[in-house]
Amino acid sequence: MIKKGYKMKNKRKLKVLFVHACDALSEVENRYPPLWPAYLAAHARKHLPDGNLDFRFCRSSEPEVLQRYKPDIVGISSVTQHYNQAVEYARLAARSGCTVIQGGIHITSIPSSLSDDMSVGCIGEGEETFTELLAAWLENGFFSPGRLSGIDGIVYRDNGLLVQTSDRRPLESLDDEPFPDRTLTGYGYRGYLYTARGCQYRCVFCICARYWGIIRYSSAGRVVNEIAHLIENGVKVIRFADENFIGNRKRLREIHDLVRARELHKKVKFSCWGRANNIDQEVVDLLSGMNVVSIKMGLESGSQKILDYLKGNVTIADNERAVILLKDAGIQVNGDFIIGTPEETEEDILKTYHFIKRMPLDFIDVNIFTAYPGTPVWEDALRSGIVHDNMDWSLINIKLHENSDRCIILSRKVAAGKIWKYYRQLRRLRFWKMVRALPWSPWRNELPGVAWKRLREKTGRLFRKSSAGLFTCEIQSAEADLFIEKKSKEIS
Ligand code: B12
């Protein structure tokens, strides 16, 4: 933590541009503004002299902001499948004379993927590390290896060699953190809260428990104050993005009681993620009592064998019971499913198909079993030589229809062509389920807007395919010209 009497040699305002690597076309990816810049900015403002800091936010599809804003530091965040974009943005930023800090899930999972244009990678939780980095930069106007070596939780290069410092200790209390500064990204109609860091379960494909370490919860009081804050700022729909919002029963009861005592359930609709084996009548009553109108569960498979491999501690019967209890309470139930696990047979996939068909699910999503860095699945795929630490990251995509011609299939039992066939079959089922559920959807008022954005996304993707990834931007600088020249060469 930075000391109160901290002195800066550099008196000029430090300009920081936060860049979110994403698919600008994707409706889902852009439905909620990201939280990471809001957390980082709020923590830095609390611990550094505020007058010296200036923050901006943009997406990786907006390289022109570099020229307009002329930041000193560019902080980029990226999931694995968009890491190529992060690398491109870092290259542009470095050529414009900016210092680049890379953070987020991908660089944390594979620190060696720090590109030459990235000065520092932030490993794991970012609030304290980022603030210390800004403090170091403010002292000299650059990062010296000597100064960096004293900062925990980072990776950087010293004389061409990659250096990783000691692990950063997790924040002790999430309640001591200020509210994320959402003014940076805008509040909007929908907002999301992330009320716990970590997860008590260890699904084989998921990084979360491994990423955040020991599970930490914000208190019910803090959660409800943040809900009230969002409502004051015009947010009408709030999603709890925690992996398992219902994992801590005592806290769920407290949140429910506080929401009702402050009558917040009359002002906003909630949705959340939850695990089926944590759902019983009490949980359903609590959710419905606080106006949670929709829940998403990773139901994953209709085959017990596959469910055991993917999650452990959940049975098909748990999944069925949870769906029925929630539906009986009038809560919209959405399920996520996975196909293409290594030992899954066609018979297992068909069990999933029939499970979805017979259950009264409103919406479903089908994903291809994908190896994400840092998970046991990644380690297996690495040993088999299917993935490696220096690959084309855009191949790591759970949506088969977005990358059907270049998807990595991990199945050992079902050929890629068959997986594609079942995927399309399941997506057709998804479509018909959705059509049936739409008239009763708690989100039906928003549907025209979403449909319009999806249509734009679809036409955009068609155009993108036909122009073979043509990159359009309006920056005028020499650096940008270089970048565009390179892109044009790639395309031709
Ligand atoms: C909410 C969420 C979403 C939401 C909102 C995302 C958004 N707009 O930002 C939606 C539904 C849109 C979404 C979409 C996707 N998501 Co998502 N998502 C999450 C979830 C559950 C929480 C993310 C979050 O906000 N956390 C809270 C903030 C504060 O944490 P954070 O982002 O990690 O940031 C902290 C640190 O990482 C660090 N940090 C992060 N960035 C930076 C940058 C700098 C410069 C520094 C210094 C530090 C730093 O500091 C922050 C504060 O401590 C995570 C799982 C998880 N528990 O993290 C998955 C997760 C990130 N998503 C994942 C995936 C795969 C996706 C999609 C690709 C899915 C898809 N195919 O559509 C897209 C990609 C979207 C994108 N461009 O990022 C995976 C990523 C795995 C990987 N290795 O790539 C995760 C880890 C889920 C999982 N179980 O595997 N997601």
Image: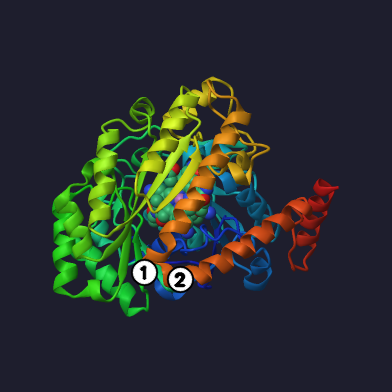
Q: Nearer the viewer, mark 2 or mark 1?
A: 2
Earlier along the polypeptide chain: callout 2 or callout 1?
Answer: 1
**Residue 104 appears in the figure:** no
Q: Quadrant of the N terminus?
A: bottom left
In front of the other: 298 or 212: 298
Is 241 left, or right, of 30 in this rendering? left
Q: How many numbered marks have been drawn onto this rendered protein structure? A: 2
Eyeballing the image, is 380 above or below 365?
above
Q: Element type at marker 2?
A: helix
Q: Residue beneath label 1, please?
A: 237
Residue 200: % across, % down: 26, 40
- The quarter holding residue 419 reads top right
Q: Residue beneath label 2, please?
A: 446
- The quarter holding residue 156 reads top right
Q: Residue at x 21, y 46 (%)?
A: 279
Is 435 left, or right, of 441 in this rendering? right
Q: Residue at x 54, y 46 (%)?
A: 428
Eyeballing the image, is 110 above or below 35?
above
Q: Dot 2: few (<14), some (14–19), or many (≥20) neighbours within 10 Å?
A: few
- The residue at label 2 has a CB less than 8 Å from ligand 1: no
Residue 430: % across, % down: 48, 49
